[in-house]
Every structure is written in structure tokens, then in C-alpha cells.
Image: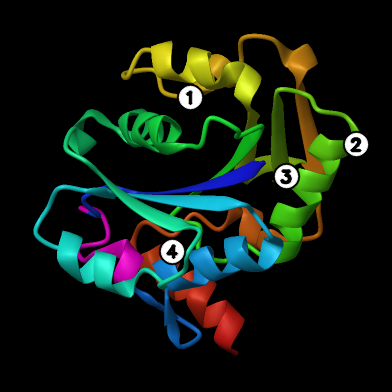
């Protein structure tokens, strides 16, 4: 079983409004990401929200799909890893790997997710990272072999401590997908990326 986790628990302070609800080609960020995961064929999808004033609006924007579950991270102020932990705890016991994407990376393509899954199926390394023009981005696939490490990682150091632990268990998959590097967490970044895709 291949799982997906979408992290949408941040407060969007730099953006000034909930990133999950921003528009991208007629759909919200959260809708676009969830649809990419569903199209890619993951077996389950966990969306992790934060406990803040916009939770209900974001929850309402999440597509209604049988394989999709919403979880709330009451400790979202402790950082991204705390939300990833909530997602991992929600996974099925049969989960072999989880593809993780952030809500501020809304340009993720279903084909990119599918390529990471195919790479894992062909040679199941513990960590597989999408990259564009030699630079790593999102999504990232974590095998179940490292779930325990992620749950035990220090919150102040994030998942990077697990990724950097042993380079031999990490594979970069180079793809022609600039959305891998599209980190949209400020109004300037939104204008740059969304404006570029709509011209």
C-alpha cells in the first residue's frame, strides 16, 4: 500500500492568508494537491490541518473522497515535523511508503508522484526525493522503514535529520517539473509562480 500525506497545518503568517485556500487555476491549493495524489493512484491520503481559525474553511475545501482522511495537529505551532508525525500515526498498518507534499507546493503533478512511486517499486530505498535541475524539492517519499525515525526525530530539527543521516539510502529522481521547486509561502512567490502558469 502506498500512502500520501499533505501537510497543511501551518499558520501562513508570511502569506497573510491561508495558503491552502489560495487559488491555482480555478481550484484551491489544497484541492489541486489532493487531486494530484488521487490521480496518481495512492491507496490512502491523509491531510493534516492545524488547529486555527481557518480549519473549517480548509476542511470544507478538501475534496470528498473515500480514501481521503483529515487529521488535525493540535501542536502545529511546534513545526512541520509535528504535522508529519500526525500524518504517520494516521497511516494504515499496511502502508509501505508515504509520499509527502506541503500545501505551499501546489504545482505538484500527478506524474511526478507516480514517478516517485515507480522508483520505489523498482528499488525500494528508504527515501526518494524529487528534484528539478539538480535541486531537491517536493514531494518526498519515505518508506515505512523510516517511519519510526521520523516519529523519534527532534521537532526543532525536522525531517531533514532523517534525510541526512545516511546518503546511501536516499535517491534523487530528476524530473522536468519546475513545480518541484515551487515553494509558495509569500505574496511575491504567489505572484511569480501562479502568474507564470497563467500567462
Residue at image location 54% in from the left, 51% down from the top: 44
Q: Quadrant of the C terminus?
A: bottom right
Tell me if mark 1 has few (under 14), some (14-19) or many (20+) residues whose alpha carbon lies within 10 angstroms of its own.
many
SS at badge 3: strand
Helix, strand, or loop for circle 1?
A: loop
- Earlier sequence position, callout 2 versus callout 4: 2
Can you name the residue that lies furthest to the right here?
Answer: 122
Identify the residue position indicated by label 2 in the image: 122
10 Å crowding of disc 2: few (<14), some (14-19), many (20+)? few
Magenta span dominant secondary structure = loop
Q: Is residue 166 magenta?
A: no
**Crowd rating for badge 4 (residues with CA inside 10 Å; few <14, some 14–19, many 20+):** some
The residues tagged by marks 3 and 4 sit, at their Cα atoms, a distance apart of 19 Å
Q: Which residue is mark 1?
A: 159
Q: Is residue 3 above or below residue 17?
A: above
Q: Which residues are magenta?
A: 13-21
Residue 38 as seen in the image, left or right of residue 118: left
Q: Earlier in the sequence, mark 2 or mark 1?
A: 2
Q: Which image quadrant for residue 189?
A: bottom left
Amino acid at each position: 500500500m502506498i500512502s500520501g500525506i499533505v501537510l497543511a497545518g501551518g499558520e501562513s503568517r508570511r502569506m497573510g492568508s491561508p495558503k491552502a485556500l489560495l487559488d491555482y487555476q480555478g481550484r484551491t491549493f489544497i484541492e489541486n494537491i489532493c487531486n494530484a495524489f488521487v490521480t496518481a493512484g495512492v491507496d490512502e491520503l491523509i491531510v493534516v490541518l492545524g488547529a486555527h481559525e481557518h480549519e473549517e474553511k480548509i476542511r470544507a475545501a478538501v475534496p470528498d473522497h473515500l480514501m481521503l482522511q483529515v487529521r488535525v495537529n493540535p501542536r502545529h505551532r511546534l513545526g512541520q515535523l509535528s504535522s508529519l508525525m500526525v500524518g504517520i500515526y494516521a497511516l494504515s498498518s499496511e502502508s509501505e511508503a508515504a509520499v509527502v507534499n506541503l500545501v505551499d507546493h501546489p504545482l505538484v503533478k500527478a506524474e511526478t508522484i507516480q514517478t516517485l512511486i515507480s522508483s520505489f517499486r523498482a528499488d525500494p530505498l528508504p527515501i526518494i526525493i524529487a528534484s528539478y535541475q539538480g535541486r531537491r524539492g517536493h514531494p518526498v517519499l519515505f518508506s515505512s522503514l523510516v517511519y519510526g525515525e521520523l516519529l523519534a526525530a527532534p521537532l526543532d530539527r525536522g525531517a531533514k535529520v532523517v534525510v541526512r543521516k545516511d546518503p546511501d539510502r536516499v535517491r534523487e529522481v530528476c524530473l522536468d517539473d519546475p513545480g518541484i521547486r515551487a515553494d509558495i509561502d509569500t505574496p511575491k512567490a504567489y505572484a511569480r509562480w501562479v502568474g507564470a502558469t497563467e500567462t
